[in-house]
Amino acid sequence: MDEPHDLQGEIRDDYDVVVVGSGFGGAVTACRLAQAHRSVLVLERGAAYPPGAFARTPSEISENFWDPSRGLYGLFDLWSFRSLDAVVASGLGGGSLIYANVTLEMPKEWFDGVSGQWPIGYGDLEEHYPAVAQMLGVRCVPQYLAARMPKSAAFDAAAAGYGRPAVAAPVAVTFAPPGHTPGRPVGTRTDNLHRVQRSTCTSCGKCDFGCNEGAKNTLDLTYLSAAVEAGAHVRTLREVVGIGAVPDGDDETYVVRYRTHTLPGPGEPRRRRPRGVVPPTREVRARTVVMGAGAFGTTRLLLANKVTGLPRLSPALGTRFSGNGDAIGFTTGGTREVDSQRGPVITRILRDDDGGFLIEDGGYPSVLGWVGETYQVGLYGRGALLLVQRLWQRLLHRRRSDIGGGVSRVLGPMGVSRSTAPLLGMGMDPGSGTMRLAGDGTWLDLEWSPRGPGTAEYFATVLQAMRGVATGAGVTFRRGPSGLLSRGVTAHPLGGCPMGRSPADGVVDGDGRAFGHPGLFVADGSVMPTAVGANPSMTIAAFAERCARRILDVR
């Protein structure tokens, strides 16, 4: 079939499996269960984003956030708790749409250090890593490409000055072969559920804003496309709001309640939902439900439905939250060009096993380079000076019409964007946060602090290492805004539904099966009982592969 998959199609009354969310947990399980001939329904609250559909203009970006109460159905879902800010995605493919492509195994040495908190062994994850790597087309950033990116060479030199070598980052990106022009077509339109032609990486640096070329091997283009090919029903703009267990002989059937969101038509203004008006809900039944809505989404849903729908859930629900040790800083100054606006967002990795953390080079799209120049250097001030000079020339009747040199002086050498580079840290944060419902029971609250026991020491170690990397490069290190405000920031929230050996220390077992509700499984980052340390996407996907195998064995 050459037509795009009908993401707004009908939904039957019942399925073998309903999957909630389409990120690294939901997409993987949906694919494997559909390939095993189970009837599968995927409910994704966000919209679909085929290549070419990601926001780029200021007006598009201003509305590219998730808040249905304000008529916003965009890609970025921002959370702000008392001591932590977080960003996650809302769209078909989940976090894969906005992550920086890095697809890295959890280091065995780091797992061994926390293995007592895991009900499974490292081998239980390791056996599934190759399947994930194959499905996502993982490869290291090729040397021929890295050689053209100043930021890669600058990071290597800084790491060497710090005393630890950097290595190429493994990423889920399709690159052109050596000697071929970037942006060349790859595959055919029928390779993916969107039926859109993809092309190879153009090094535009916009990975975290969504890849309009389709070079990023996101979950909608890989696992979910395979799931659809195997017969799965994938439906977008369907937000799950309720889950309840209904006795069914010696087993349970699950009733999943969802509401449908409707996007404004072309040219129509977005409309804020009137206070107290809630869209109607519909129901679908399944013998098995797989939660894949992420650490915040899954935890919030299960907390909201624990009393009335899922009464036997473990009291451990909401515990063991971790931001995966995410930290951000910047190197700036010096004479070496970095040009962090070119290439994949992350290309190189420095690993410190003694401290249990990674430091990665970072990038940002060109629009943020302009923001940095305006803030740091004062483009407005230089522009005002040019206007004053032009007025003075007119008063003196000097009507010079060629002003290219003046405009160039306003822009200046763009030293900030040329020499500033983000440093991204992550590692084995202790993970002692707790989530609970607040207010009227609809909002999620998080008790976590960057100054907590063990957490403060971890962040001090990572930031000191970042300073060392900056010193090795002969440049200045600056902390990010959240750090200066004594707040944490994460793009990798984990925990909330941790796996454990019993209901006393976990919500699910080592296969993702909920204690007390045998047909409910959790396959996303919320099951991680500790930080993963490395970028967690590959470990979440590997666990989801394991979870799918277990479902096929017992359901």
Image: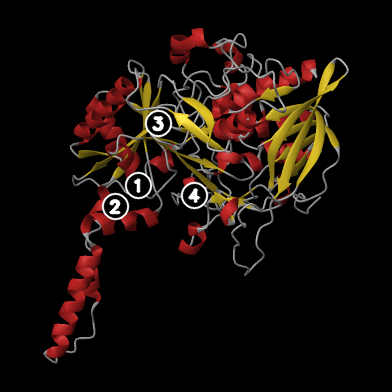
Relative vertical location of residue 164 with respect to residue 242 in this rendering, above or below: above
Q: Quadrant of residue 80?
A: top left
Residue 244 percent across, percent down from the top left: 75, 29
Kindly tell me whether residue 521 is visible in this rendering.
yes
Q: CA distance from mark 3 to mark 1?
A: 19 Å
Q: Quadrant of residue 302?
A: top right
Frontmost residue, 211 versus 116: 116
Q: Which residue is mark 2?
A: 417
Q: Which residue is mark 3?
A: 326
Residue 209's disc number? 4
Frontmost residue, 295 versus 191: 295
Badge 3 vs badge 4, beta-carbon distance below 8 Å: no
Q: Which residue is mark 1?
A: 340
Query: What's the residue type where badge 3 is placed?
Result: Asp
Q: Which is nearer the N-term, disc 3 or disc 2? A: 3
Badge 3 vs badge 2, beta-carbon distance below 8 Å: no
Q: Which element carries disc 3, helix, strand or loop?
A: loop
